[in-house]
Image: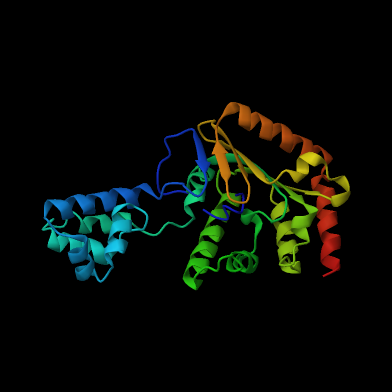
Amino acid sequence: MTEGIHAGLYQSEVAAASVQYNSSTPSPINWRYSGNQMKRWRIKASVSREELGAAANYSPDTIKSMEQGVRMPTPRVLDAADELCRAEGLLSAAKEYLQKEKFPARAQDFMLFEQQAISRWSYEVALISGLLQTEPHARALIGDHCPPLEEQTVEERVAARMERQELLTRKPPVALSFVLYEAALRGPLVDKDQLLHLLAAGNRNNVTIQVLPFARAIPAALMGPMVLMETRDRERYALSEGQSVSQFTSDAEVVWKHTERLSMIRAVALGPAESATFIERMTEDL
């Protein structure tokens, strides 16, 4: 999720200390609340889903999915429901709270805490961290999504990723450490501009970039990407992800295990100066 979460968390406040993300992750709470209110008003006014659907030009099944929070209630359906149910603007008022999320649902809690970070350490196995991507590289990665994304969704996610990079220049500075496995640098979508961008980012006094060459790989480095963060409130979080399931947690035992693994990887990776030389040599081959 580092970049499978490449994705985005921050419209809702998180109450739980440990969050598991998978295919059954609940949709955003503002979708569910607005949909539930729409259903309650509809039932109170004895309006059927068919009637509401006809007024808003949606099928009854689509109305049902909105009421269940599976789909975001649209401004059109909220206005139609408000009029049919005589809600006097109470349903239409929900429109301003239903702006489209910048990031996929599984990423939203992570992004919320990332914005509060005072330090962030990460390890990437196959992809350059989203915080270090150029806009063309981000667009190439997001646009190559399977299944394909709509062009508007691609542009929204690219813009959100670029916005995240404010973390690099924030004041007071955030301590940022990135370790990149050599495979991430040799990806087919990585060009010379992207490598030069890494070198420039590494020159910032709050940013450390290390490369783990193939020749120095250890078993701990092949177990997948991870992120460790500490917030302004001195809370520590760990993020790890697989192909379809990600874990974002503050559980002390899990955070400790991830810290130990990242420490081992950083110990065998090239130092910052050696890493810069490694990347510079790669640019000469492009």
Where in the figure is residue 12, as x and y percent of width and height?
40, 45
Q: Is residue 196 above or below residue 68?
A: below
Q: Residue at x 74, y 50 (%)?
A: 180
Q: Viewed as shown, does residue 56 lie left or right of 71?
A: left
Which of the pair 12/231 is nearer the observer?
A: 12
Between 85 and 158, the one nearer to me in the picture: 85
Regarding residue 69, the answer to whether it shows in the image is: yes
Q: Is residue 280 above or below residue 246?
A: below
Q: Position of residue 26 (x, y in %)?
A: 42, 47
Residue under the point 50% across and 50% down: 23
284 displayed left or right of 258? right
Q: Quadrant of residue 281?
A: bottom right
Residue 171, percent across and down? 55, 46
Colouring scheme applied when the structure was drawn: rainbow
Q: Position of residue 86 (x, y in %)?
A: 10, 58
Q: Is residue 20 left or right of residue 183?
A: left
Residue at x 71% of width, y 67% of height: 189
In depth, the one of 221 and 262 nearer the eye is 221
Does the image show residue 74?
A: no
